[in-house]
Amino acid sequence: MSALRLDHVNVVVLDIQRSLAFYQGCLGMLPIMDRVLEGAWFERLTGMTKARARCVILQSPGGGCRIELLQYLGRDSRSLADNQLPATPGLRHFALRVDAIEPIAAAVLQRFGMAVEVIEVPADIVRGGKRMAYLRDPDGAIVELSQYAEAEPAFCG
């Protein structure tokens, strides 16, 4: 069996321009693809007839993390957006490892008026120290910012 690596995280959004302002403007991610997905292959993949979506893939500077923003065209996804609580079963958040949380928190406050609370993780959970914050993208997806004191975090069992 081959080793698994995370390829990308997908976030379905209601307004891709608003989401790009967040992911590019606040997190500094760069677009590496921007196109409309459609056709028989996409309909089979999604199980939806006439499925069309604008897809923008963003990458962190220098590589590493990739996020796929997908805005379905011609469909109203707002009725699906009520599953937003961190404790709701299923995928609740994704974490981005950052060198410093403060510049991102300042950008989020300036551009979106959202205050970001930075939390110190207890030393008996992550040796060496970790600072983290939860924030929400414009459609409510929870994004965790993780700042470790050491290059390789040591989790305490």
Image (cartoon, rainbow, N blue to C red):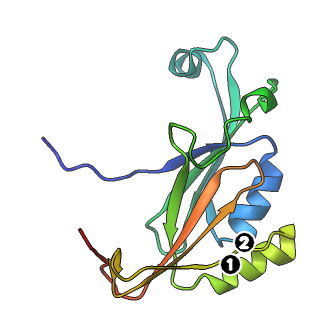
Q: In what quadrant of the picture does the N terminus appear?
A: top left
Q: Please tell me whether residue 54 is drawn above or below residue 46 in the rendered image.
A: below
- Residue 129 is left or right of residue 35, and the answer is left
Of helix, strand and loop, which one carries label 1?
helix
Q: Quadrant of residue 150?
A: bottom left
Q: Where in the figure is residue 137, as x and y percent of width and height?
A: 72, 56
Of helix, strand and loop, which one carries label 2?
loop
- Residue 23 is left or right of residue 10, and the answer is right
Do the CB atoms of the residues marked 2 and 1 lie less than 8 Å apart? Answer: yes
Q: Please tell me whether residue 11 is drawn above or below residue 58 in the rendered image.
A: above
**Residue highlighted by disc 1:** 104
Residue at 78 percent across and 54 percent down: it is: 138
The residues tagged by marks 2 and 1 sit, at their Cα atoms, a distance apart of: 6 Å
Q: Where in the figure is residue 106, as x and y percent of width and height?
A: 76, 82
Residue at 73 percent across and 35 percent down: it is: 82
Between 7 and 123, the one nearer to me in the picture: 123
Between 151 and 93, the one nearer to me in the picture: 93
Between 61 and 147, the one nearer to me in the picture: 147
Q: Quadrant of residue 76?
A: top right
Amino acid tagged 2 = Cys
Residue at 67 percent across and 36 percent down: it is: 83
Q: Where in the figure is residue 118, as x and y percent of width and height?
A: 62, 79
Residue 26 got which mark?
2
Amino acid tagged 1 = Ile
